[in-house]
Amino acid sequence: MYQLQDSVLSIKGIGKNLQASLSANQIEQVLDLLLFLPLRYEDRSAIKTLAEIKNLSSAQTQISQSVENKKVKTNFVTTRAKVLRWNEYRKGRLLISRATIIDSTEQLNCLWFNNKFLKNKIIIGQEYFFSGNLKNGSLMQATVEKVGAENIHTGRLVPIYPQLADFKQGSLRRLLAETISKLHQSGELEQVFRDLHFPSSINKIVLARERLALEEIIYLMQKSAQNKQAHQLKQACYSLKAIPKKRIVTLPFTLTKSQEKAVQEILADLQKSSPMNRLLTGDVGSGKTIVAAIPASLLVEQKQNVCLIVPTKILAQQHLNNLKAIFKDINFQLVVADQKSKQNEAKLTSQATFFIGTHSLLNQLKKIQPSLVIYDEQQRFGVKHRQLEEYLGKMQKPPHLLSMTATPIPRSLTLSIFSHLDLSHLDQMPNERQMATTWLIPKEKEDKALEWLVKELLDEGSDTNHTKDVTGNLNGTADSPKRKKQALIICPFINPSSYQATENVAAVKESFVNIKNALKKIYQKLNVGAKAQLKIAALYSKLEKDQQAAIIDQVYQQKIQILVSTPMVEVGVDLPNADIIVIQSAERFGLSSLHQLRGRVGRKGQKSYCLLFTSANLNNNLNNDPNINYNHADSSLAVQKRLQKFCQEKDGLKLAQMDLENRGAGDIFGYQQSGLHDLRFASWTNVAIINAAREKLKLEPNYQSLLQNYLEKKTASSVIDTATN
Ligand code: ADP
Ligand code: MG
């Protein structure tokens, strides 16, 4: 019997080696393993007879599969049959296994390569489930499982896990089945784990996810209450002295009313003797940075160090450039984790300094002793890095803390989860900027859409409405009225468990090649000479950091006009010039995530566009295909409707609400897949769960989240993940 807190080493089949590889993935205890959740489920419960398989229209088996949709096997079938014949032979180094299987309707050939375990498994005359790909009339590399009560690989909804060390899917399933079958008194959670790993229906998965979500929200609420208690008792390390009436900072723009209000709220906090703990929220592009930087600059003028911590190196560099140009008399220093450039050590000088950096700054808070820490989580929310928490907790007189986020979440919800925070919200956009005009592009019109895009980009921008802001000036576009237009093309993660995974790189590369080929044709058609052709580049996190920086640089200088990237890399970059965003496989994203991506273009108030492309398989009738993957669980019609609504709705909160109403397994996974959300199980917009958590704590104030230990660990590591970007 296994207890949740037992080491994974106690699980049958896990030895020292496996333990080490699990540990490298932060899976140390039984509970960690149980919470290693499937990425999706394959429906292998629909059993086809061999006659049905033979009759499958050739059209269906000829569907080309792009890398991006590799996992959607449109010709993937499950059948139940007896083995009639079986043999094995070698062709050079290749081991080939062949079987003929039979049911009451037909016979079918099966083929495997280099599967040396099969011969111990297959018994002639025995009945098995076979799940595999149909190719040229044969079933290829099928998963074989004896028909029985406890099927885990076939004949049911089968979990498909994210890549984990060298584990094969089959071994992961066996490991989890073994663990779940011998769980000792894990109470309520036991059924939750069963439903998550080996569900009897999609609905069970959704309910189980919600159960975990509830525990997660309870955890956050409890944590917040603790923080509040600890924080209130303390004195701030420094309070802002009177602010000189005349400050000679000229902003290159006028602050919006809500920016001004937020600045005032922060200044008022900084003058108090207790430490500030404020959250600044506002959509992408609402101008949070300057709101934080103005009070920070005042502290520096009063000889205090301040730190601005941002998720990526690229972003740190951007903020540095922007702020240096505005606050000319202030001493800035960049601190990013980078061995080569040696910028990873904060250097203290006699002058007070405005430090800007990535999470590597966190190690150095003790040395820097800042009076204000600004923590920019971007799309992450409310999840402070453990190192920062420890530092704040340890300090007798802690610094002021300002967190920033673009996650759309209603004020009342924020306050009910995070009782320890004060809130400032930016509800206005600078530049009166319009939300990007959004179109859902049918598959057959994608080429046309790309052609339109090329024409747009080739047509040197006639709008000059772009010199208003800092970045524009820095980029020298003020001097070049003929601004070039730019486009972003987003390809989704294939393996969101690690955005550096090889599959993700392959996806970006393949998109890149496809787009380049499409462009070639368009150039020919439009008679665009080599010289006039658009510069295009791909950005992904496995690329050398120097190369990444070089690409970003060229994008800035508008030498690159089309940037192909994954959502995660893109999150870290502010591209004020981008006019058009193309989102591939848009159906994989929640509407909130799509909205955030859409917010990346038109940031200077220029007219902007968002084009939604969908995955190839969507055009087939998913309803008739029992083997669809449940990221794409919505019928193609429902997807169309959902995305169509997105095209019309511009309000982030309403979109978040729609996500909630549409929720289903597909959507739940969509959240994770977008890479834009930091919660493990819950979503910020799930009002019902947030209320339920509040009620639970009201009734049982001492209730301890079942996931407390686990989330405590994860909080720390999830943030580190982004820090390496
Ligand atoms: P976010 O809220 O997403 O962090 P930023 O702080 O990066 O947004 O600001 C987005 C862009 O808008 C930056 O280029 C910034 O210089 C510019 N900006 C900020 N405030 C204003 C304003 N009041 N008027 C015009 N441009 C502004
Ligand atoms: Mg920002």
Image (cartoon, rainbow, N blue to C red):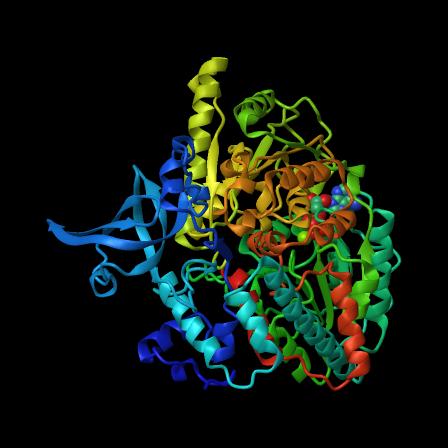
Q: Position of residue 580 (x, y in %)?
A: 62, 33
- Name the residue rendered at 75%, 83% in the picture: 230
- Please give the name of the residue rendered at 68% of the width and 83% of the height, measured from the top-left corner: 704
Q: Nearer the viewer, residue 594 or 42?
A: 42
Give the percent coordinates (x, y) of residue 12.
36, 80
Q: Is residue 290 above or below residue 368?
A: above
Asked which quadrant contains residue 350, the reply is: bottom right
Is residue 513 shown left or right of residue 606? left
Which quadrant, please, contains the N terminus? Answer: bottom left
**Number of numbered discs on residues:** 0
* Left or right: 499, with 665 as reference point: left
Q: Is residue 200 above or below residue 28?
A: above
Q: Residue 715 in the image: x percent, y percent?
A: 59, 71
* Residue at (44% x, 16% y) in the render: 524
Tell me if residue 69 comes above or below residue 485 in the rendering.
below
| Residue farthest toward the front in the current orientation of the protein | 104
In the foreground, 84 or 701: 84
- Left or right, 66 with respect to 86, comes to right
Residue 22 versus residue 548 in the image, above or below: below
Q: Looking at the image, which is closer to me, 555 or 481?
A: 555
| Image quarter of residue 129 | bottom left
Q: Residue at horizontal 52%, vertical 33%?
A: 562
Residue 277 visible? The answer is no
User: Can residue 242 be seen in the rendering of this structure?
Assistant: yes
Percent position (x, y) of residue 158? 46, 59
Q: Nearer the viewer, residue 38 or 426?
A: 38
